[in-house]
Structure formats: structure tokens, C-alpha cells
Image (cartoon, grey):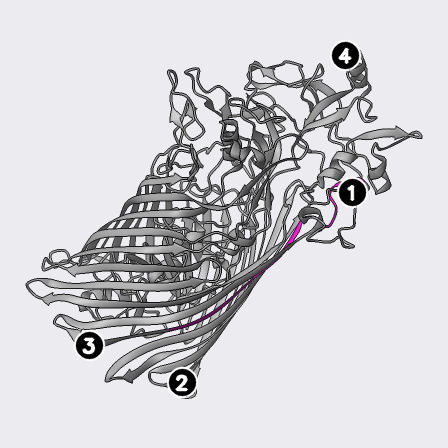
Amino acid sequence: MSAVNGTRGGPSFMSALLATSAFATIIAGGAAYAQEAPASDNSTVTEIVVTGSRIKSEGFTAPTPTQVLGQQELERAAQPNIFTAITQLPSLQGSSGATTGTFSTSSGQQGLSSFSLRGLGTIRTLTLLDGQRVVPANVTGVPDISLFPQLLVERVDVVTGGASASYGSDAVGGVVNFVTNKKFEGFKANVLGGVTTYGDNHQWLAQVAAGKNFMDNRLHVQVSGEYDWQEGVPAGGFGEDAPGSRDWYTTATLVNRGVTNDGAPQYLYREHAQAYQYTKYGLISNGPLQGTAFDVNGNPFTFQYGGGGVPAKNAAGNVSGCYSNGGFCVGGDLSGNVGIGTSLQSRIKRMNSYGRIGYDLDDNNEIYATLNVARVESSNQPNPGAASTNLTMSCSNPFLPASIVAACAANNITTFNFGTSNALLPRNISVHPTRTQYRAVVGADGKFNALGKEWRYDAYYTHGQNTTNIHVNDILLMPRYRAAIQAATVNGQIVCADPVARANGCVPINIFGGKTPSEAALAYITPKNGPYQHSVQKQDVASINFSGEPFSSWAGPVSLAFGGEWRKEQYHVQGDPYGDGNTDSPNTADYPNDPVLVASGANWFAGNYHSGRGSYSVKEAYAEVNIPLVNSDAAGRANLNMAGRWTDYSTSGTVYTWKVGATWDTPIDGVRLRAVTSRDVRAPNLSELFAAPVTTTLPNFTIPSNGTPPAGQPSGGAVTAFQNVVGNPNLKPEIAKNVTIGAVLSNPQWLPGFSVSVDWYNIVLNGGISSLGAQQIVNFCYAGMTQFCGAFNLNTPNAFINSQTFNLASIKTSGFDIESSYRFELPSVPGRFTVRGLATNTHKFVTNPGIPGAVAVDSAGQNSGATPDWKFLAIQSWDNDRFAFSVQERWFSDGRFGGTTTDYIECQSSCPVSTGSNPTIDYNRMKGATYVDISASYKFGNGLQLYGKIDNLLDRDPTPSPQTNTGLDANPALYDLLGRFYHLGLRYSF
């Protein structure tokens, strides 16, 4: 990491600018002085260490672009979690947070705040705290920013390029490094409240920090604590009932015609889509009684299909006028749709405590210890009820109305298929993850003399442990549910038809209508002890680093950094017996043996967590050198920066990474050129290596109607299926090649205070660890790739698809980063003005799954994902000694639908043959969005500051992001789902 003093270059202007700026976003590497960060109000900073290099040398400029967000800019964002402020940087694409993953039951990532650079995923971005790794908060190996001590963060460095040679595995997309104030002295506090314009997601944040020096200022003690509560945005209801008074949800769906070669598009974009296999309180979905629905009181009525649909009343359950392959009509009775019944933001309760003790052995050397204890509790509703289709019901069920029993007899049938949203359940599914982190560090840093030269060092040992407990409440135990809905009359009483289930506590329920089941019946089908997962991640790291200037060349001192690191990662995950299976998780008093259940697990509607364990260790050594090449008034100043790292994994062997870069401060006033190329790696995480199956539910999974199904498998239609993703201990590290080339104009004499930079980047990743999606596996099989046909069974009631991870995929992405700022004063106006803009262009993002017959897909510009063509952040601010005001615009460009394995071709007629990778569609456009935020603050002069902010001032609604099922149909990775948001707070310091 480079150390830059505060007086380099055109010093008086820039030093004053940085010291007094109320808007302190610093674009590191984007301007000649961008690696200088503003000092905290309560401490004197004599040295700034900038992430991006291990070199520490006065005047050194790293070739890798780095963006730095200062303390004042983080404060201006007025967010209860500074993660939200950082993710607004255009280069951060696809990060996870409180508004993502809320539709999921099984992932365990709900409420997890983790960064993704360049759209490469959270697992390919390395996040550090004071340059040190942090214990993962999830089996995927990523930390949770919510667990970081945030009030003492004085800046955040974002390296927008590969940095594995300097910092190790995972830094493929780049590095995000949180830098805390280690010498804070005094007291400060912050309280913040917020609410949406719809009256939900109430937020309260309280933070305090104190620091004091003892023993003639040699002993430094500081502590901080914070409490953050975010109510979240609750789920909507059935149909299109969005939460609050939001009116933007329209059940936008990509309806599959099932025909690929007739010249018309295979997929149709339609709003107000209706899944015709189920309704809110139940629908007979095939046979002569097809189209008979039930109201809340259990009375039968004729269901209103959209689009004038008429039920075929055959065994297949087709509906003329609708789309039988996808199972949708358009319009009609939408009351049973479940897509909007997911939380728009998880509820969050965050508690954090942090302490640091440092002791100066002398003026140049310190020993220290830190302790961070934090907990984050979250909850979300993934969907209402548990929509179930293709239930085979008997005409002799005593809960059936007499008219239906008579109709069965008249039509000479004994059974029929049935679908229901299960709106009769009084409580909806809710998921409750709790993450608790303990992290301790002991270390030393400072300077010493050797061989006549001054050397710097830092050494530390850290131990971290994260415990995650996930509870799922009010969810169906499916074998019991299927037993409870099959009722019979025995000795004049209505009981469960299955005698085995009856002998083990089965209580029948009436699913024909909306009558609430008895408490005994609910206890049987949705037991108190639902799906459960207990996981523990542990991390131990020992690291030592040295840097110095051992000799000089003709152009200046040669800088050298070197060091080594040892790291061990381990985890253990335990699921409940009903989800995991009795072999790995024996039955207990809370989960007693039940012969109705499947012994191998996967008994829950969703949240079938499985057990697993594993560990690996890493040994690393690195060296980095900076060689000045030119230093003259005529030729400017140029340097060559090189780094190499040897890494040995206990699981996958040895891998090498390297970096070669250069910068040239040209003789032209303010102009700098820079370039860097690197070889970077991401090692497989513990989940990818050792995980037992991770099971997720795929409602309304589409079965191909084209191609050749394997023997015994259905053709066309939709089912509810389980997807099981399993680990692979033979995985190898991913290898990436990064190239960045850029030019900077910073603070020229002819326009003081102005800077602009343009960088082109190109990343090629090979051996990418990925698993094929369930739809891909099935599509490949039906297309004739028989090697995939043994991985699934789509026959109900236990349809499943198995998928394993492999080093198959490749990713190629490239584009531009553009940054500009201008700081000025007007003689007639008191105060200072700042105009700043950051933009990222994703020219391409090509993913190749590496499977024979599969086509590479370019997802750049797919606004259903995370990589729009352009993403832009602009800020205009004015401030003086007491008052500050700013306007911010967040914008991304128009795009299209699609995904990493699918790129649609828009056409109306004369369409090409539709394929799995390039299906045809009649409409393929997604509007971009512009969000305007305003903020203001006022200092009272006694250490008290009042501040406020309005996010999404114009209350811009999200653009629909349609899927091929009735999901949430919105993309929280890009669009704001919450609406206008008000924040008001107070800060106090002395």
C-alpha cells in the first residue's frame, strides 16, 4: 500500500481543498492528488495508506485506479449502513443487500451486505478491514459489511482492478478496504431516523464512539457501539396488491408459447399474467370439472380465465386462448397470484461493538489489539402461503361440496387435479437469519533501521468466528400436507385417509376454500420447529509485511515490499433432520421420527438445508517493487511497478499471480498516463468444495415442449421442482487476466481544481466455478445432450434437478471508467462549490458456460441483471463553514431482458429459430432510471450538526423485470423498489 504525504504537488491549494471540503469524495488514481484523503476533524493524519499496492514510498502513485470515499462523503449519504452509500459507485455492480434475496427461502443470504465489482459477483471482490481479511459471514466466503464497526471508518478505498498479487485470492474484480481512525480522541455520536413516503421501513440508528490517550499519550484507547433497526418493507398480498399504496406491480411475465420455429416469437412480454393451474382458494385444473374454482367460503364458481380462455377439460388441463406451454393467461381473475407477496426489504436489527487498544513502544513502533463483536438479525417473507399445483384430489373427499361430488359421479371420474395458493393459511412463510461475529486482532507496526536504511513493517494475527442460525417459520411440511388434504370419513368422522399418517398425528384440512385450519391441523402441517440451519465459519490469519527503499536508481529511490501470510478457513453446517435427512441429522425431540416423511430429507416446501463441513489452509509469499525510470523536467516522471505472489492451497495446490504496471507524469501540465496488467485468482470457497446439496424450490418450473424428453419424462407444462446444488472437492482456482489503461488530467495550472480521468479495462476469467441452472440442464437434455438426462426427474410430486459445480465457465468483460470533478469558488458567493461525476461503461460481459452446444451470452446492457451499458453518479454541492447543500443524480441506461445464459432476440415476424441461449421474444426493452437525491446540513457551532436527506426525490417506480414465472418481477440490483425516502439526523462531537 502506498503512503502519500499531505503536501505533494500543488500543495497549498489542494491541502486547503481537502482539509476544508464538506464534500469529500476523493477519486484515487483519477486525479494526480486523488490518493490524498481528508484528515478527520479530531486527529492529525501525517500519512495516508492507500489500497492498491503494498509499496510505501513518498510520492508513489499506484498504476491501479482506486476510488476513495472520505468520511464526510459517507456522512453526507445519511444511511444507517454505509454499505448503501458505497454501492452507489458505478463500478460496484451486483452487490447484495437488504433489498436483494428477499424472495429466497433457502439461500441464507437474506440481509447480507456484500460488494460486487464489475458485476463479477460478491465472491470475486475482496473486502478488507484496515487491510486485513474478515471472517466470512456465509458459506460462500463473503463478509457482511453490517458487522463492521462503522462510526470509526474514516475512508473507504475501492480498487477497481485485479489485486491478487498484492492481497491474495478473491481480488479478481478488485478490493474494497475500510480504513478506521486508529488514533481517534474525543467523543462523537450520531442518531438518524428515516421512513419512506409510503409510511414503511421506519429506521433508527444510534452510534457513539470515544477515544482517549493515557500515559503521556502512549496508550490509545477507543471504543464504539451502534444500534441499527430497520423495519423493512413488508410483503404485499395476493394478486397485484403491492405493499403500502405502491401501484407499480403488474405481474409482468415472459409467456412461453412453446413454439420455436414458426416465424413468430417464442416468448411474449405480457403484464397482468395469470397462472391458470391454481387460484387463491383452489381450482380444479383438469378433466371435465376444469375451471371450477372455490371462494373463501368454499362455494364453487366458474373461474374467469384471462384472454377469454376456455378450459379444454381434458387430462392435460389446457386452456384455449391462453398459453398452455407456460401455463399463463392474460388478465382475468388475478387474485391468486403470489409474486408480490415477498418483502421488498428485509427487516434488520444490527448491534455492533468495537474496541482498540494501542501502545506506542516509542515514537515509531506500536503494538495493538482490537475486538469486534457484532450481530445482525434479519427477517423476510419470501412468498405468501405455498402455492401448490397438480395435487390429485379424490371425489370422495368429505370436504367437497355436494355439487362437486355429484358432478364427479355424473362425469364418471373419481379424481381430479387441483391447485391452490394456500391462502387459507393464517400465517405466511418467514425466514429469520441471525449472524453473530467475534473477531480479535493482535498486531504491531512501525519502523526500524537495517543496513543503513529505514524499513516499515506490520504484523498481525487475527481469529474470527461467525455463527449463522437460520429459522424458517410457518412453512409446509409437504408429505404431511399431502396427507392432511386427503380426507376420508371413518366411523362417521372426517380423518386423514392414510392410516399411517393418521396413526402419527395427522389432522385433516379442508383446502376447498379459505376456512382456516384448526390449530391442531396447523401444528401438523406447519410445525413449530421449522427448517433450521446452524453454521459456523472460522478464520485464522497470520501476516507479516515489510517495505523500504534499499537503494536508489538514476531516477530516484527503488521501493520494495515483501511479506508472507498463512490462513486457515473452516466451516461446519448442520441442517434439521426433516430437511437434511436422518443420516446426517438424526431425529430429535424437536424433530421426531415420522414414517410419513422421506428419510433422505427435502420434506419442506422450501428451506431444505443440508449439512456439510470442510476446511483448507493457505500459505503465501509475495514481493513488490517500484522502480523509478524517469525523473526530469523535460521528460516528466515515470515508474515501473511489479508484484508477484506464490500461493499454496491445501486443497488445490500451488498457483502464481503477478502484476506489472507503470505510470508516467508527462511534461504536459497535469497529464498522467497509467497502465497495469495482472494475473489474478479466486480459490473455490468452502461451500463450492464441500457443500452437501443446497436445495431450492422452483415453482412453476417450465418443462420443454420441443425436443425429445428422456423415457418416462413429461413434455411441456410446468411443475414445482427442487434444485439440488452439490459441492465438488476437485475444483481448482479460477484464473483471470486484468488489463487497465488510462489517462488523467489533474489540477492543471490553467484550470485549478479540475480533474478528469478515463480508464479502459478488460478482464478475462477462465476456469470459472459455476453450476448449470436447472432450466439449462433440462433444456440440454431435451435438445439431445444425453449426458444431462440422468440429473433430473420431473414427475410429481417429488420433481428434482441435481447440479454440481465445475471449472467450466469463462467470463470476458470490458468497458470504461470515467471520473471528473471541479472545485471552485465564486467571489460574490460565500462558500465552495463542487461538481463531480463518475461513470462506468460495460461494453461487454460475455459468459460462456463451457458446455458443448451452449452459446456464449453477452449480458452487458441486460437491465434484468447487474451490468447496464452505462451507470452514472453525479453530485453538485455547495458548502460553507455552517451550511451544506447537495444534489445527487444516479442514472443507468436503457437495456433489455436476459441473463448470463440467455440473450433474447426481439422480433415480431420472420423470427429465426428460437434456441435456449437465444430465444425469440416480441418485446425486449427495459427503461433505465434516474434517481435524484438531495441533502443538507447545518452546524450550530457547539459540535452539534443537524442533517437531512431525501432519496429518490421524484419517487421513480421500478421498471418491470419479467421472468418466466410469476415471481417478484422487479430487479432490486438496479432499481429502487422502496420509493421516496426521508432521513433526518443529529451528529455531535467534541
Distance from disc 3 to disc 1, alpha carbons, whole Å, reads: 77 Å
Which is more N-terminal, label 4 or label 2? 2
Q: Pointer 1: what residue?
A: 524
Total number of numbered labels? 4
The magenta span reads: 521-544
Residue located at (78% from left, 50% from top): 592
The x and y percentages for residue 936 are 37, 55
Whether residue 514 sits left or right of residue 134 in the image: it is: right
Whether residue 290 sits left or right of residue 618 in the image: it is: right
Distance from disc 3 to disc 4, alpha carbons, whole Å, reads: 97 Å
Mark 2 nearby-residue class (10 Å; few <14, some 14–19, many ≥20): some
* Callout 2: SS: loop
**Residue 573 included in the magenta stretch of the image:** no
Which is more N-terminal, label 1 or label 3? 1
Mark 4 nearby-residue class (10 Å; few <14, some 14–19, many ≥20): few
Q: Nearer the viewer, mark 3 or mark 4?
A: 3
Residue 676 appears in the rendering: yes
Residue located at (82% from left, 19% from top): 402
Return the residue nearer the eye: 226 or 924: 924
Distance from disc 2 to disc 3, alpha carbons, whole Å, reads: 33 Å
Q: Pointer 2: what residue?
A: 218
Q: Pointer 4: what residue?
A: 411
The x and y percentages for residue 502 are 85, 38
Q: Nearer the viewer, mark 3 or mark 1?
A: 3
Distance from disc 2 to disc 4, alpha carbons, whole Å, reads: 92 Å
Residue 294 in which image quadrant: top right
Q: Pointer 3: what residue?
A: 551
For the N terminus, which image quadrant?
bottom left
Tell me the kind of residue under disc 1.
Tyr
